Image (spheres, grey):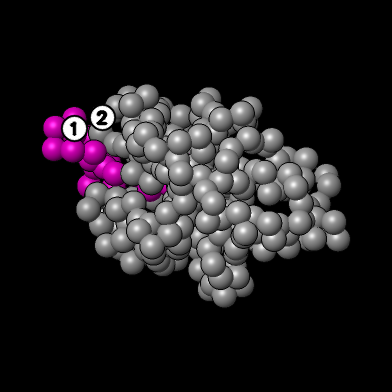
């Protein structure tokens, strides 16, 4: 297996970090290196097609983190890749609402005790309860929903960006997007030395019509703010269909 940690890969990571820092307006190394940073997907699309209730999320192998969750839906124009999620690191809401069918006891009580607040529980904390009680959550559709759909990454800010913006690990992974960035970002984009990376990231610095629009000051932690989580940056389209968010998790939400 080829390791990503080679001089060439390390230089590419540097170029990515510099580009992401430009988008944030501060270097990535100024952020807490010991914190857990995650990227999540929300917006109307994931709810309208009910992917946040798809049985793939609650497979034991997915909840334990042994297998990823794939969504057969390209999030970005011109991209053939589809997003890969981490069910173990995602956050579930149980129950989803007051009209949800009840989960069986004593499983329901065990889940309630493991929630870190307001019926929210990490997939990794749900996994052992599913195994212990022998409950197939796929049979209880409507009793759970994915509250924060985490894209698969290693917990670093660099990798959260890489997952959110779908850059991959090598220059060959870049998507040849064609999008006009907002004029205010042109100077910053000009500092990116790799033309493919410059074109790729321009898609995430638009007015939201043909690409995504960055959200800095008004970024949201997508309902996790009240649990000590902090938004870093977000992106959204101009039609309310897709939201991407990078969040710094609190120890409570990270399960630390």
Q: Residues within 10 Å of mark 1 (few under 14, many from 20)?
A: some
Return the x and y of residue 240 as percentages of the image width and height: 35, 36
Q: Is residue 12 magenta?
A: no
- Nearest the eye: 248 or 252: 248
Return the x and y of residue 45 as percentages of the image width and height: 38, 30
* Label ID, residue 142: 2
Residue drawn at x 52%, y 56% as measured from the top left: 184
Residue 113 lies in what quarter of the image? bottom left
- Nearest the eye: 117 or 42: 42
Location of residue 201 with respect to 232 vertically, above or below: above
* Whether label 1 touches label 2, CB < 8 Å: yes
Residue wearing tag 1: 100
Q: Residues within 10 Å of mark 2 (few under 14, many from 20)?
A: some
Return the x and y of residue 93 as percentages of the image width and height: 29, 44
At numbered mark 2, what does the secondary structure look like: helix, strand or loop?
Answer: loop
Question: Is residue 3 rendered to the left or right of residue 75?
Answer: right
Question: Is residue 175 rendered to the left or right of residue 165?
Answer: right
Location of residue 198 with respect to 209 vertically, above or below: below
* Label ID, residue 8: none
- The quadrant of the picture occupied by the N terminus is top right
Question: Is residue 10 rendered to the left or right of residue 63?
Answer: right
Q: How many marks?
A: 2
At numbered mark 1, what does the secondary structure look like: helix, strand or loop?
Answer: loop
Residue extent of the magenta highlight: 87-111
Residue drawn at x 46%, y 57% as measured from the top left: 233
- The quadrant of the picture occupied by the C terminus is bottom left
Location of residue 252 with respect to 103 vertically, above or below: below
Question: Is residue 177 rendered to the left or right of residue 164?
Answer: right
- Nearest the eye: 220 or 88: 220
As measured in the structure, the alpha-carbon distance from the residue carrying label 1 to the one carrying label 2 is 6 Å
Residue 68 visible, this angle: no
């Amino acid at each position: 297996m080829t390791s990503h940690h080679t001089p060439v890969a390390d230089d590419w990571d540097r170029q990515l970090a510099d580009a992401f820092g430009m988008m944030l307006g501060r270097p990535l190394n100024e952020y807490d290196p010991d914190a857990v940073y995650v990227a999540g997907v929300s917006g109307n699309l994931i709810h309208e097609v009910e992917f946040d209730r798809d049985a793939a999320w609650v497979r034991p192998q997915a909840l334990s983190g042994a297998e990823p969750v794939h969504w057969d839906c390209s999030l970005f124009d011109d991209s053939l890749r589809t997003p890969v999620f981490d069910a173990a690191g995602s956050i579930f809401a149980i129950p989803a609402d007051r009209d949800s069918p009840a989960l069986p006891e004593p499983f329901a009580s065990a889940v309630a005790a493991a929630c870190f607040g307001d019926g929210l529980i990490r997939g990794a904390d749900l996994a052992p309860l599913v195994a212990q009680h022998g409950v197939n959550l796929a049979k209880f559709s409507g009793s759970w929903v994915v509250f924060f759909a985490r894209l698969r990454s290693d917990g670093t800010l660099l990798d959260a960006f890489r997952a959110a913006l779908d850059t991959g690990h090598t220059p060959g992974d870049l998507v040849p997007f064609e999008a006009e960035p907002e004029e205010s970002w042109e100077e910053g984009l000009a500092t990116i030395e790799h033309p493919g990376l410059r074109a790729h990231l321009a898609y995430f610095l638009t007015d939201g019509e043909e690409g995504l629009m960055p959200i800095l000051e008004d970024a949201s932690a997508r309902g996790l703010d009240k649990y000590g989580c902090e938004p870093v940056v977000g992106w959204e389209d101009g039609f309310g269909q897709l939201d991407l968010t990078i969040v710094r998790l609190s120890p409570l939400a990270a399960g630390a």
